[in-house]
Image (cartoon, rainbow, N blue to C red):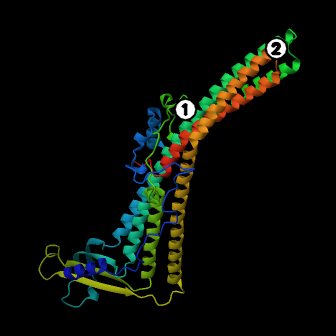
Amino acid sequence: MRRALILLATVALGGCDLAPHYIRPASPVPAQLPSGGTYPQLTDAPTTAPADVVWHDFFTDPRLRSLIDLALANNRDLRIAVANVAQARAQFASARANLFPTVSANAGATFERQSQEAIFPGEPRRINAYQVDAGISSWEIDLFGRLRNQSKEAFQTYLANEDARNAAQVLLISEVASAWLTLASDQDMLKVAKATTAADLQTFELTKTKFRVGSASELDVRQAQTGYDAARGQVASETALVAQDINALQLLTGAPPPVDTLPDGLPAAGATLANLPVGLNSDVLLRRPDISEAEHRLRAANADIGAARAAFFPQISLTATLGTLSGSLSGLFGGGNGTWTVAPQGTVPIFDFGKNAANLRYSKASRDLAVAQYEKAIQTGFKEVADALAQRGTIRAQIEAQTSLEGAAAAALRLSDLRYRTGSDQFLTVLDAQRTLYSAQQSLISVRLTEQSNMVELYRSLGGGLK
């Protein structure tokens, strides 16, 4: 019997596989990332792939690194992703266990006393029976790969959930960095708003003094007041934005961010590496965990087709026991008391009203859906990287233009203020110059935020942040 079980196990584990041969779909994007012109010039062979740049090395500001560590330890979305991985791992273990027989042992005793009138002379009136046996019950012999493909599907689903967890980490790191930089830019905006308010207040007081001595009109006073009131309102608005930015960070980190991890404005040298090594080949996108997740789900759908095909073929199961039976406990393991049973069973589908055919069509449709999702993930990744590179290729020109614009606006304000004080120009010119300078300062801060956030986005879109 032992040899028979070994033979059956060998047949079951080495049966045919009806799943289609997996071939990775062709990439639906250009073979090369965009380079030159609007985009920065890329190198053919980067020394280190962006996905291999450790995030602790990529983010250079120690305050930001501490905040990311806090988020990785406490963020609830990441904990949900980790729990999903644990669930998928357990489901794979359960599906894999179905390939092997479940061996169980049983022990029992029966004590019976028969009626005197129901037995023949000489037969015992009291009957005792002791029995011990071990065996397998309804073990499916997987000749056509149904259980093996279900196990493969569960395994690929587990790997997909693992990649989903990795994608959640990459996204979390980029979100924390972006929120931190947004807070820093809003702090700079608040500083500019306060400085503008102070300057507008000084102008307002000076204009009122000139009005009292008759060298300025009431219109000049009202115009100065509008500038001052607008600046005060902007201070209140920026103060609220800073508080909301801190609340956003608290949600991402899962705990109140320590004061020493918060910025005090955009870092002059940036919070990340100045550049990332980027090669020309678009195969770098395959390092993204979301694309890897989509491919694992495609492999799972492919295995599901094999399980659906196997449902058309006979299912063979085996029940077998090996034990001993005796009328006395002392003779339970005596010679000649051994028992065994073997009960193979086969089930052949004959007519199921198209159920198996519908399941197979569903599996094939699910595979087609997974192919489209995989290709869409690659296309999305290519667009995100291309967009980040396009912004990277033009951001320096924007910084230079906005810096020059701020300098020119500041000079224009000084000249218009001087002309107004000497009576050579109207106060409206000064007010326009103040508004132009304030707008230029805000725009420069926004462009600096875009520059630093762009590096974070480029790092994320290239799959960085996992290590």
Give left or right: position of 338 versus 192: left
Q: Name the image quarter holding residue 330.
A: bottom left
Instruction: Look at the image and tell me in which quarter the N terminus lies.
Output: bottom left
Q: CA distance from mark 1 to mark 2?
A: 37 Å
User: Hey, which residue is sitting farthest top in the picture?
Assistant: 213
Residue receiving disc 2: 208
Q: Name the image quarter holding residue 10.
A: bottom left
- Expressed as whole percent of the image width and height from the top left, the position of residue 248 reads 57, 39
- Identified by mark 1, the residue type is Leu
Residue at the image position 32 percent from the left and 77 percent from the top: 137
Q: Between disc 1 and disc 2, whose residue precedes?
A: 2
- Expressed as whole percent of the image width and height from the top left, the position of residue 429 reads 80, 25
Q: Is residue 243 visible?
A: no
Alpha-carbon neighbours of circle 2 within 10 Å: few (<14), some, or many (≥20)?
many
Residue receiving disc 1: 266
Query: 181 or 392: which is nearer to us?
Result: 392
Contact, mark 1 vs mark 2 (Cβ under 8 Å): no
Query: 395 or 241: which is nearer to us?
Result: 395
* SS of the residue under disc 1: loop
* SS of the residue under disc 2: helix
Residue at the image position 78 percent from the left and 18 percent from the top: 419
